[in-house]
Image: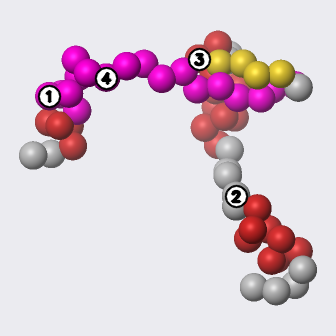
Amino acid sequence: MTNSEILESLQAQRTKCTVWSRVMGYHRPVEGFNIGKKGEHKERVFFEQNKLKRTANGKF
């Protein structure tokens, strides 16, 4: 069974998920963003803090 077939078979059990993001000091649902802000949100890159600390200390 493919992924799309599985999703179709479980469609009745699925619920809508609201994604929130912090913008200008407060939280807003992403679905309320204008088209430009939605584009920026898709381009965001997430990082792991532990990796950042290791790089900042000069250790890998």
Q: Are marks 1 and 4 in contact (CB under 8 Å)?
A: no
Q: Could you classify mark 2 by the number of other residues whose Cα lies within 10 Å: few (under 14), some (14-19), or many (20 or more)?
A: few
Q: Identify the residue at image location x=42%, y=19%.
A: 16
Report the side of 42 relative to 5 (left or right).
right
Residue depth check, mark 4 versus mark 3: number of the one nearer the observer: 4
Residue 54 in the image: above or below residue 43: below
In depth, the one of 19 and 4 nearer the eye is 19
Q: Identify the residue at image location x=14%, y=36%.
A: 5
**Which numbered disc flags the more N-terminal residue, 1 or 4?**
1
The circle on residue 47 is 2
Residue 52 in the image: above or below residue 47: below
**Which type of secondary structure does the marked residue at label 4 adopt?**
loop
Per the model, the C-alpha gap separating discs 2 and 1 is: 34 Å
For label 1, the residue is: 9
Q: Give, as a three-letter code, the residue at label 4.
A: Arg
Quadrant where the C terminus is found in the figure: bottom right
Q: Residue 48 at x, y = what percent?
A: 70, 61
Residue 5, can we see it? yes
For label 4, the residue is: 14
Report the side of 35 relative to 49 (left or right).
left
Q: Are marks 2 and 1 in contact (CB under 8 Å)?
A: no
Q: Give, as a three-letter code, the residue at label 1.
A: Ser
For label 3, the residue is: 31
Magenta region = 7-24
**Which numbered disc flags the more N-terminal residue, 2 or 4?**
4
Q: Identify the residue at image location x=37%, y=19%.
A: 15
